[in-house]
Amino acid sequence: MSGNNVRQPACQMSFCHAVLALAIAVALGSGTASAGEKLDMSFIQGGAGINPEVWAALNGDYAPGRYLVDLSLNGKDIGKRILDVTPQDSEALCLSEAWLAKAGIYVSAEYFRKGYDATRQCWVLAKAPAVKVDFDVATQSLSLAIPQKGLVKMPENVEWDYGTEAFRMNYNANANSGRYNTSAFGSADLKANIGRWVVSSSATASTGDGGNHEATINMFTATRAIRSLSADLAAGKTSTGDSLLGSTGTYGVSLSRNNSMKPGNLGYTPVFSGIANGPSRVTLTQNGRMLYSGMMPSGPFSVTDVPLYSSGDVTMTVTGDDGREQTQVFPLSVMAGQLSPGQHEFSVAAGIPDDDSDLEGGVFAASYGYGLDGLTLRTGGVFNQDWQGASAGAVLGLGYLGALSADGAYATAKYRDGSRSGNKVKLAWSKQLALTNTGLRVSWSHQSEEYEDMSSFNPAETWLQQNQGRRTRDEWNAGISQPVGGLFSLSASGWQRSYYPASTTGSYRYADDNGKETGITGTLSTQIKSVSLNLGWSGSRNMNGENTWSASASVSVPFTLFERKYSSSTTVSTGKDGGTGVSTGISGALNDRFSYGLGGGRDSDGGVSSYLNAAYSGDRANLNGTVNHSSGSGTSGSVSASGSVLAVPAAR
């Protein structure tokens, strides 16, 4: 027969049984089997050959297979991605970290910790709160709705730029000569970039009448960044110690965490948290200044990368798509030493004392700090064969009450006549009042009589030799600053220091010595158009009850004459001893490089003085010269030169 007349079999028996079994199974699956009862496939002809796991997966939410899906995150299209759905994904998709990262999605391990499948090493995102996973097989689309709090920034994976090899030196030299003395001074700051190292050095030299010559290298270090630790490694002549315990100059090495090494890590960055009922714009403002504004998806969110440099209430406004607004106020006070939540710092240093130190033997110092939400904790220690000390401190945010810092130290010093131990405590509080923008600060410190910090300790002396004179017991400081409606700014501060009785330290004590000193200062400044006015006052009382005070007022007025700009300034001062001093001057410029000034006046004793100065700003140096004359000390003059020298070998 011809091929067209060949009779084809209707169907093979095994294939027909399989099709029939599948049809019956589908029909039954839409009936009572969907109620959760397990279907007995052996009951159906040919059903025994069907894998129960595959059958269960086919009846799950997601059918196993490979899909090319259109992926979106919080309504934003990401693009097409290949999605492999396994039988284990039939009820809920489990997405691997690698798959998410390839799509540019980085999730918070903390937020999704309940949804992590350790066996399969993937994330069941739908198990986290406020998360929606919508996989539409018909349209081949996968839509993810993840709150901002469940997302993290893309990990940094960039090559660091260590800069071009270069050499720079800033220098300054000045000299003066008068009726009673002649002196000169010079300083140089060196910085060189060599590969991944930065070499820094600072040196000074001075000379004067009587053959007094002095030259000092204050610092010489080589530093490089350790990327994996976000730390700086330094070696050379530097200082080793602690801000509370004191320090000493050493030749050694140190490793210190640098939280400002990466962009965006400057300043204190608290956490601003909230909940968005839908796609919303979140805005942060402080003292009328906008700090941040950005869109957030529905669900909980947190803003963690807004640095604060000043105290004051931060207002968070959440504006939804429907125009509704939610407002929340975060009262925050920024203090020195605060670490952002989750941020930490450390420092380890070791060295031998330099020539200017009185210590002998090695010096070792270590410290560590960690930032929590509203709390920063620190601890440290400094150790030497003759001096050991430990410190601990905390900075606590008090919300509407401001911020409080507390530090304590304990040290043991081994003198020539034996060891002495003592302690030191410091408390500080600050607050910025949002309503009036008033700044308040108060601090108090106390140290026991036998406490000695490392900076002033000399093991070659006895305790009495070391402590000739008065020793501070308590010190109070308080201050207030108040801007007034943009019209003027007022600030005032006061202090009080009390001492241990001089008789216990071998010093003579006056009969009317009350062991206390006090002082107060105040300033008021304003600017009306281009005219500036400043008022100042200060007063103090020493331990013998003697008072002294001084006051001053100055005004600066710019003006134009013959199409040239000038500035005039006048200062009036007086004090406890009576008499009034007046000085006035005028300054101007011939061009962008050359400026000058002249003036004169009289002091509170009636002496007359005058001056003339000139300055030139060049490409390689800045030059200054001044001539002074007074009725008491005659004529004197001074000159100075400053500038920078820069060499970039790669530019040649």
Image (tube, rainbow, N blue to C red):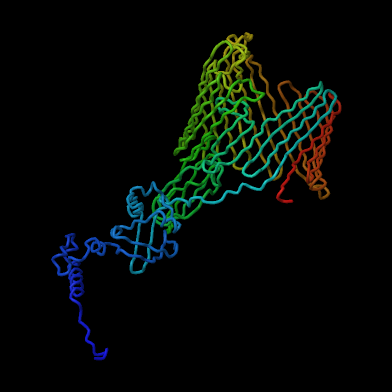
Place of residue 259 in the rendered image (x, y in percent of width and height, measured from the top left): 54, 40
**185 w.r.t. 226: above or below:** above
Question: Position of 575 compared to 136: left or right?
Answer: right
**129 w.r.t. 369: above or below:** below
Q: Quadrant of the N terminus?
A: bottom left
Place of residue 333 in the rendered image (x, y in percent of width and height, measured from the top left): 51, 37
Residue 12 in which image quadrant: bottom left
Along the viewing direction, whichever of 30 and 516 lies nearer the viewer: 30
Q: How many marks?
A: 0
Along the viewing direction, whichever of 420 and 81 lies nearer the viewer: 81
Place of residue 211 in the rendered image (x, y in percent of width and height, measured from the top left): 81, 22
Q: Residue at x 84, y 33 (%)?
A: 627
Residue 558 in which image quadrant: top right
- Furthest residue to the front? 1
**64 w.r.t. 613: above or below:** below
Question: Position of 112 compared to 335: left or right?
Answer: left
Question: Position of 594 compared to 154: left or right?
Answer: right
Along the viewing direction, whichever of 424 and 378 lies nearer the viewer: 378
Place of residue 120 in the rendered image (x, y in percent of width and height, measured from the top left): 33, 53
Q: Residue at x 61, y 46 (%)?
A: 162
Along the viewing direction, whichever of 285 and 347 lies nearer the viewer: 347
- Furthest residue to the left? 43
